[in-house]
Amino acid sequence: MLKDNLKALRKARGLSQQDLAEKCNVVRQTVSKWEQGLSVPDSQMLLVLSEVLQVPVNAILEVAPVEAAEPTGSLPQKSEVLNRQTGRKILHWLMISLLAAIAAGFTVLGVFGSAYLGWDFSDPEIAVVGTILHGLEWVFVRTAPIAVMALLPGIFLTRKKKEA
């Protein structure tokens, strides 16, 4: 995988993330994100990495050697596929986080209830705050089940597929 190859090649050349970042004219955090799989270098940056690490692009991408008959658009296509896979992973964890937040919201409502209902609403400022809280709670209780019904299949569909 790109992130593992990049890290191994960098270490094999005795370069720190900072050293590689300087040679590629990017910040160290960018190299870190590549090595963590949070982002991928674009096709132009892959060429720069190939030159800096003194290896063919294929060694970074872990693909078979490019044959002469293969179209030149393959490198940007590979980069696009990697970007899509990273986006899928981020979306998957975002949906899991949202599902956890909904569960936490229902837990808080179950434990504490609607405490604002016991407030003295004769003060206009308290009445406004209480009304806003009641409206937010109403929207949450009505929309959360729909969101859960959408999130569960979404989490299932964006999970990492087992490689054969």
Image (tube, helix red, strand yellow):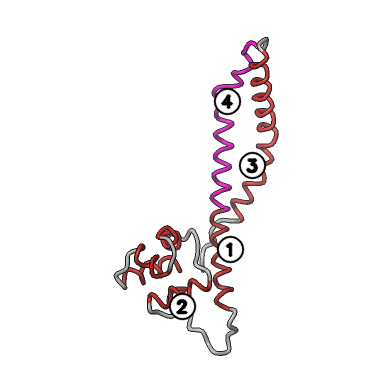
The magenta-colored residue range is 91-120
Along the viewing direction, whichever of 52 and 59 lies nearer the viewer = 52
How far apart marks 4 and 1 lie (CA) works out to 39 Å
How far apart marks 1 and 2 lie (CA) works out to 19 Å
Contact? badges 3 and 4 (CB < 8 Å): no
Task: Look at the image and tell me in which quarter the N terminus lies.
Answer: bottom left
Q: Residue at x 56, y 52 (%)?
A: 92
Majority SS type along the magenta span: helix
Question: In front: mark 2 or mark 3?
Answer: 2
Q: Earlier in the sequence, mark 2 or mark 3?
A: 2
Secondary-structure class at tag 2: helix
Under mark 4, the amino acid is Gly
Q: Earlier in the sequence, mark 3 or mark 4?
A: 4
Mark 2 = which residue? 57
Under mark 2, the amino acid is Val
The numbered dot on residue 110 is 4
Q: Residues within 10 Å of mark 2 (few under 14, many from 20)?
A: many
How far apart marks 4 and 2 lie (CA) works out to 55 Å
